[in-house]
Every structure is written in structure tokens, then in C-alpha cells.
Image (cartoon, coloured by chain):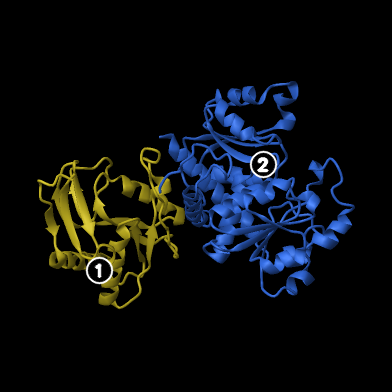
Amino acid sequence: MSNLSVNHLLGIKQLSKNDIELILSTAQNFKEVINRPIKKVPSLRDITVANLFFENSTRTRLSFELAQKRLSADVVNFSASNSSVKKGETLVDTVNNILAMKVDMIVMRHSSPGAAIFLAKKVKARIINAGDGAHEHPTQALLDAFSMQERLGDLKGKKIVIIGDILHSRVALSNIFCLQKLGAIVKVCGPLTLIPKFITSLGVEVETNLIKALEWCDVANMLRIQLERQEIKYFPSLREYTMLYGLNKEILDNLSKKIIVMHPGPINRGVEITSDVADSSQSIILDQVENGVAVRMAAMFLLAGRQG
Amino acid sequence: MNTTVRPKTLLEKTKFDVTIKRLCHQLIEVHNDFSETVLIGLQPRGIFLARRIQNELEKIIAKKINTGELDTTFYRDDFRKKELIPNRTNIDFLIEDKNVVLIDDVLFTGRTIRSGLDAMLAFGRPKDVELLVLVDRRFSRNVPIQAKYVGITIDSIASQNVRVEWKESDGKDMVTLLDK
């Protein structure tokens, strides 16, 4: 178990349990590296990475860029708003033009589900999916699993509930795949309109009562309501959503045990989670952000290692 | 391994102990009370020697000696040529302006030590760096690196392997020369 079984990081679905464990254990080494006085290692000094973000991102993009720079890779950034995509160029043409400039690895976020898988078949470069529509966001799931492991150790048998807008969330799907492969039990919780029908076929239970879900779990992963992806109304009002599914300090303090609270960001404070919960000692939201850099370093290091 | 050729024992238990004790006394001659000196063992196998030296020295001078573990995987120049598994790095002291004794079990091509020198610089700028090895495979170097303290020096060819076993991990202390 010293190399990945895949050439690209397209989704958690394509990874084996060994792959996931290898990335997480390598991330542990990188977490030590990014806490040194000098946070940089020369591993990828001969690699050029292009970050292609066809959708907005702050955290993921910054995290990837920092991870690349700490591995000494050369980095080029590209965002769709000021590119030839606006002039009608296709995705494959855009990417092949970038690769013609001798780029070795592509990190891509795209609004179409499956965009990264499509690209991996069409171009010669290592592809990392940084989010494709409501499909997968593998590095987020890996950093979530890493952060949970830091607090709970082995995740086998641990209970995790994902709460909120499951329907529009790529984080939810990747988390479900990743956590189940690591042996955890996953539930989803939210209004039924925001829970896709297929979800039970993944072996995930649905709970519509927030308190019951929280009483059951060891970890609650709170998701944002993705209003920008909702073309129709899925619930009467945000206020009503918050009343039924928002996590506040009172609910948290009244639980029979201390659970861990996570959020992939960006947070809508006062909607799915109140400020006092987000900033409480039970919240590991900022740990998730720190671990994101280490996990992404591990993923890129291991993928680049396959270029032999 | 070619079973027709018998492995040659280079160091067995008693000589192994004597060699480590001698290395410790050589270190004391140079570093006195170790107030300005730290030990750093290179992962994965150099850490056994580093810990052994540390224990021996602490017995003799009755004082704690800062000892760390350094992994060089991310600094290697043969990354992507072979599969490398990173190990733990654990240096919980400053090496700025200290005398550092880098410790590894076998000195062969010198490439691990080269990457170790790079990796070490992430923890500060030492005043002085020395190298201590248990086995020096001379005439095998790819880079101009030599050890200051050497347990045994051997002549070997590239097709041979030197195996260093440690009580802690392998059940016995022994150095053997093997034909691949």
C-alpha cells in the first residue's frame, strides 16, 4: 500500500479504501510540514499545475494554490469570467491549449457533473476534481474525514449526520462515499424536498427531525442552503428552514452528549448554524480549513508520484 | 536473494555494542556536555541508531540530549523513480545555531544524506553539521558526502545489500552483507 490505484482524483467513488487511507496518512506528514518554520518542501518543483475554476470559489482555490506552492509546484490560475470560454471555446480546447504550454496537472471546478471524468478521458494530464456541479468534491470529503479522524480516531462504526441541502450538495455525496468506505454510518437530515430520492439506495438513512438526528450522531456536518442552485422554491422561507433545521447553542447544549460540529463553508451565519455554535469549542470548522491544505498536498504529491 | 551465497556477518551482538559505545565516546570527545549539540536520526532506519546513541550518551553524561527524527521523502531526488512512503518527522527543538549530528544506519550513495541536509534546513540554520553512520559502504558514493563518525567501513559492490537489524524492531542487533 504505497501508491494510489488511480491516475486522477475524480471522485471518492473511484477510490479504494486503501487509496483513502494512503491519502489521509500522507496528509498527516504534510500537516507536520505546514506547521514548520519553513512550510515548503521541494517535492513538486518539476511540476506545473493549472487551476481551472469555471465556478466561484474562495476556500478551495486558495487551499489548492497554497498546497501547490508549499510543494514547490509552478502554478497558473484561470477563472472562467475572464477567459476564452466566454468567446465560445470548448472545455477540451481550452484545456488542450493550456496543456500545450507544458502543464502536468489540472485542478478543475466546473458546474457540470462529470466534467472532470470527461476531461480525464480527453486530455493527457493528471486531473483533480475540485467540485463538479452537485456530483462530487473529493478533496472536501477527504479533509472532512481527516478532521474527524483527528478527533475520533478510527471512523469505523462512528455515526455521522449530514444536515441541510443534500440535493444540491457535492460535499454530501463525496462525504457519504468516503465515510462509508472508512466504515462509518451515515445519515442525512433535512426537509424531504432537499433530499434526493436515490439517497437511500446508497445505504444512507433519512431523518427529518433535527433533534433526533443530533441525538443519534457523533458528528454533525452542517451544509449551506445553496440558493444559487435552486431554480424553484424547496421550502416556504429561510426563516422556517432555520427554525426547523438551524443548529443553535440551546439545541447543542441540551443534547445528551458532546457532538462535533463541522461545516464545509461558506457559512451562512444565522441560517443553518448560529455564530455561537460555529465559534464554539465543539466546532472544528477552522481545523477543516487547515487540514484542507495538508490533504490537498497529499493528493497532489501521490498523483504526481504516479508519473514515473 | 541468491541462496547459494551465505550472508556474511559484519557485526554481531558484542561487537555491535562495542561499536555503538565507541561512537558515543568519540562524540563526547568533540561535543563535551552536549549543551549546544542535538542528534537527528534519519527515517526510517537511522532513528534506531539515534535512539541507541542517545540512551548510551545520557547514561554516560547523565543529562538529557535533544534527539529528533527527520523524514527526507519530500526532499528526495528519486521521487517518481520509485515508490516512497513518508514517515514521521519529529523535531521539537530549535536547531538554529546548534551543532547537529545527523545519524543514519548505512551510508551508501549519499543521496539520503543530501536530502536530509535539505530537509533539516526547514528547522533552522545549524552552526555545524556532522554525520554519524554505523556502516560506511566506501567507494559507492554518488555525491561528495563523507561521515565524520563511522562504526565500520566495508567494501561492497552495488549488487550487494547491507542489512542492519535492531533489537527494537527485528529482535536482534546484527549487521549482515547479503548478495541480492
Question: Is residue A172 visible in the rendered structure shown here?
Answer: no
* B129 versus A308 height, above or below: below
Residue under circle 2? A135
- Locate residue B104, reporting x and y percent: 29, 56
- Labels 2 and 1 within one chain: no
- Locate residue B88, reporting x and y percent: 42, 58
The chain to which mark 2 is attached is A
Q: Quadrant of residue A138?
A: top right
Q: Colour of chain A?
A: blue
Q: Quadrant of residue B134?
A: bottom left
Question: Is residue A39 visible in the rendered structure shown here?
Answer: yes
Q: Is residue A73 left or right of residue A206?
A: left
Residue under circle 1? B28
* B156 versus B64 height, above or below: above
- Locate residue A184, reporting x and y percent: 57, 59
Q: Residue at x 53, y 57 (%)?
A: A35
| Mark 1: amino acid | Ile
Q: Residues within 10 Å of mark 2 (few under 14, many from 20)?
A: many
In terms of secondary structure, where does tag 2 sit? Answer: loop
Q: Quadrant of residue B41?
A: bottom left
How far apart in space, not on screen, are marks 2 and 1 (Cα)?
62 Å
Q: Residue at x 16, y 42 (%)?
A: B157
Chain seen in yellow: B
Q: Residue at x 38, y 60 (%)?
A: B69
Nearer to us: label 2 or label 1: 2
Q: Nearer the viewer, residue A93 or A181?
A: A181
| Mark 2: amino acid | His
